Amino acid sequence: MDKRVGNTSMVMLPWLAHGHISPFLELAKKLTHRNFIIYLCSTPINLNSIKNTVIDQNYSSSIQLVELHLPSLPELPPRYHTTNGLPPHLMDTLKDAFELSRPAFTNILTTIKPDLLLYDFNQPWAAAISSSHNIPAVQFLTGGAGMAAYGLHMIYKPGQDFPFPLLYPRFHKIGESVDFSKIPDNVKKDIDRFLEALRRSHDIILCKTFEEIEEKYIDYLSVLTNKKIIPVGPLVQETIKVDDEQHMEITQWLDNKEENSVVFVSFGSEYFLSNEEMEEVANGLELSEVNFIWVVRFPAGGKKIVLKEALPENFLKREGWWWRDGQRRRKYWGTKAQPLNARLVEEVGVGVEVVRDESRKLRREGLQR
């Protein structure tokens, strides 16, 4: 893999989840306009999901996809070398297998000899390998500054109030500290990885955010990490022109609605609602009497689910759209898998957090409001 004269070469190593690979790819696209050559490294199953995007948008000459092969484990076949469709009990196995790919990743670095490594939140081992070959390593946080600052505050300053109370999750009382003695060993391991990955970042940390929304959190995160935080923007995916009939029909439907009269409901690319949650969301939308676009997702590789059977009787007769792929919206509304992000979007006025009950379950009454 030859480097081009006059260009800066960078290896990117995102965590094996679509919600992490996507912002790495969008950042890669922007960097190519600044004379960067990007080598985006991930497992074959993840690269297959973005290959067409790279080719169709004419980035194939400046963004090269590099396969990283994880060690062969009986319980973790190649189809599980991604968080998409991964059985929950194998998540820790995937994290360990990722770390066990050190020899393969070392070979990639020594072959490419990049000018810089950009790595994710849980890969201190990758930064260590890079530094041992005199390649600067910089961390890229894809989850926003507020979430990172809140987590670090809980770790570094237990018992002290977080300086921005609006971000407190509803289930966490202000002033309440975390009892780390009660945290499971696998979670402690995740925390250690995260802290070590932060420490190893070379002087700066990139963060998927922008100052207009998270300036105070960016500043506080810089204090906590003792590093300069560089916001890289929201990294929204480029608009892809689609001419198919379904997209046109939805666009026309939206055009016939008043502004800010349609709500968009989505729970993240890899969060799947239980049957009980599906029913509560559906009934909440029914009670609210609003127009909506609801992105419905089911786990890949499992039993085939018929949408009509997963929803309450006669619900599909309601005024709304249900998408199993893609999304188009006028106004954002809904919940996030991450409660801190839900608090943030509500704080800045671009979304509404759906309040859960004391057992942290979704209830139709919370959605109705």
Image: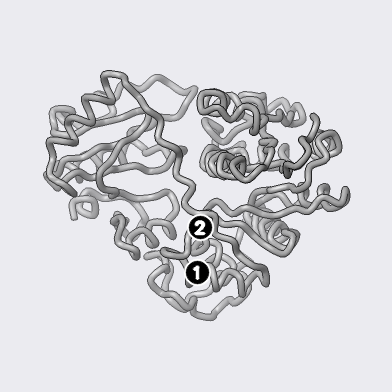
Q: What is the C-alpha distance between the residues marked 2 and 1?
A: 9 Å
Considering every residue shown, the one lying at the far bottom of the view is: 160
Residue of label 1: 217
Residue under the image location 73 percent in, 41 percent down: 7
Mark 1 residue type: Tyr
N-term mark: 2 or 1: 2
- Please report contact status of discs 2 and 1: CB closer than 8 Å, yes or no: yes
* Residue toward you, 231 or 108: 231
Give left or right: position of 361 versus 270. Answer: left
Residue 92 falls in which quadrant of the image?
top right
Mark 2 residue type: Gly
From the top left corner, tell me how far across and down residue 286 is, in percent. Answer: 15, 41
From the top left corner, tell me how far across and down residue 220 is, in percent. Answer: 55, 73
Residue under the image location 66 percent in, 29 percent down: 65
Residue of label 2: 144
Q: Looking at the image, is 169 positioned above or below residue 20?
A: below
From the top left corner, tell me how far across and down residue 227 is, in percent. Answer: 67, 68
Give left or right: position of 256 versus 175. Answer: left
Residue under the image location 50 percent in, 61 percent down: 147
* Residue toward you, 284 or 48: 48
* Residue toward you, 328 or 179: 328
* Local crowd size for mark 1, using a 10 Å CA cut-off: few (<14), some (14–19), many (≥20): many
* Residue toward you, 369 or 363: 369
From the top left corner, tell me how far across and down residue 9 is, in percent. Answer: 73, 42
Q: Looking at the image, is 337 positioned above or below residue 51?
A: below
SS at circle 2: loop
